[in-house]
């Protein structure tokens, strides 16, 4: 994925709060990014953040734009050996579960499937973008688990009440859907746990956030 595509993905992640379908689950359906004003980019960004605060009053701290960056699934920055899964069909390994990939990850065992990304270093994670298989399968609902350190206990992303959050995912095989967390998490490992699928647990994904200095 080139720089322009990466910029579009980052802007789309911001735009989901502006053009998204809002619900108690805080689902954000990706749409076209807002048009930046090249002559006054700072003012444009302030307008975006004001709109986020107005439309999402329940959000404790609006996610700053610089922490909505794709973390490396789509562009290959995250290496294949850092992507694992509970199981995979021979055709569709975990390493192919990248957003906009021509292939996908497809589980071979339906019980408690998951796909996991090792970010190697401590990273702020603010959301997930998922996409269906491109053929016949997609994940409709999922949870997100993470480890703050490789040896630490796994935790789940929660909602504003502290309950494990079940995110609403895809409704077709190809349209990317972005979900932003109510609160960002700091993680070295992130796991997507499909809980409801159409045609089997299959997806392509990107993690959103920012690397810590």
Image: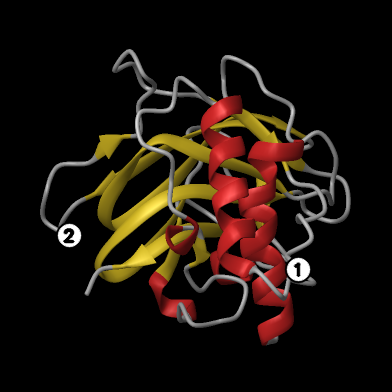
Q: Callout 2: helix, strand or loop?
A: loop
What is the residue that sits farthest to the left in this orientation?
A: 151
Residue that appears at 45% across and 64% down: 66
Give the secondary structure at mark 1: loop
Looking at the image, which residue is at 57% across and 20% down? 25
Is residue 135 toward the left or the right of residue 106 in the image?
A: right
Q: Is residue 107 visible?
A: no
The percent position of residue 7, horizontal first and vertical second, equals 66, 73
N-terminal of the pair, mark 1 or mark 2, is 1
In the picture of the structure, the residue carrying the numbered disc 2 is 150
Residue at (29% x, 18% y) in the render: 162
Q: Which residue is mark 1?
A: 103
Q: How is the image coloured?
A: secondary structure
Count the numbered circles shown.
Answer: 2
On-image quarter of the C terminus: bottom left
Q: Please say whether residue 27 is visible from this viewpoint.
A: yes
In the displayed structure, does residue 64 sit left or right of residue 28? left
Instruction: Name the spot of residue 100 as percent of width and height, x first.
Output: 74, 67
Q: In which quadrant of the rendered image does the N terminus lie?
A: bottom right
Q: Are marks 1 and 2 in contact (CB under 8 Å)?
A: no
Tell me where residue 58 sits by quadrant: top left
Question: Could you say which is closer to the camera, residue 197 or residue 70?
Answer: 70
In percent of width and height, residue 152 lies at 11, 49
CA separation in Å, label 1 and label 2: 28 Å
């Amino acid at each position: 994925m080139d720089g322009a595509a990466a910029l579009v993905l980052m802007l789309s992640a911001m735009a989901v709060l502006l053009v998204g379908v809002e619900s108690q689950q805080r689902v954000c359906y990706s749409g076209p990014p807002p048009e930046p004003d090249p002559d006054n980019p700072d003012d444009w960004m302030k307008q975006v953040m004001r709109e986020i605060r107005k439309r999402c009053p329940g959000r404790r701290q609006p996610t700053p734009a610089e922490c909505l960056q794709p973390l490396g699934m789509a562009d290959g920055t995250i290496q294949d050996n850092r992507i694992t899964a509970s199981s995979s069909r021979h055709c569709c390994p975990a390493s192919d579960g990248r957003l906009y990939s021509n292939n996908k990850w497809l589980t071979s065992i339906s019980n408690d499937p998951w796909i996991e990304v090792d970010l190697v270093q401590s990273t702020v994670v603010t959301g997930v973008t998922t996409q269906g298989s491109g053929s016949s399968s997609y994940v409709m609902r999922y949870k997100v688990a993470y480890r703050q350190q490789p040896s630490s206990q796994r935790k789940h992303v929660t909602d504003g009440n502290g309950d494990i959050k079940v995110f609403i995912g895809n409704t077709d095989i190809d349209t990317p859907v972005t979900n932003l967390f109510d609160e960002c998490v700091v993680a070295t490992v992130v796991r997507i746990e499909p809980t409801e699928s159409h045609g089997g647990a299959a997806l392509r994904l990107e993690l959103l956030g920012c690397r810590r200095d």
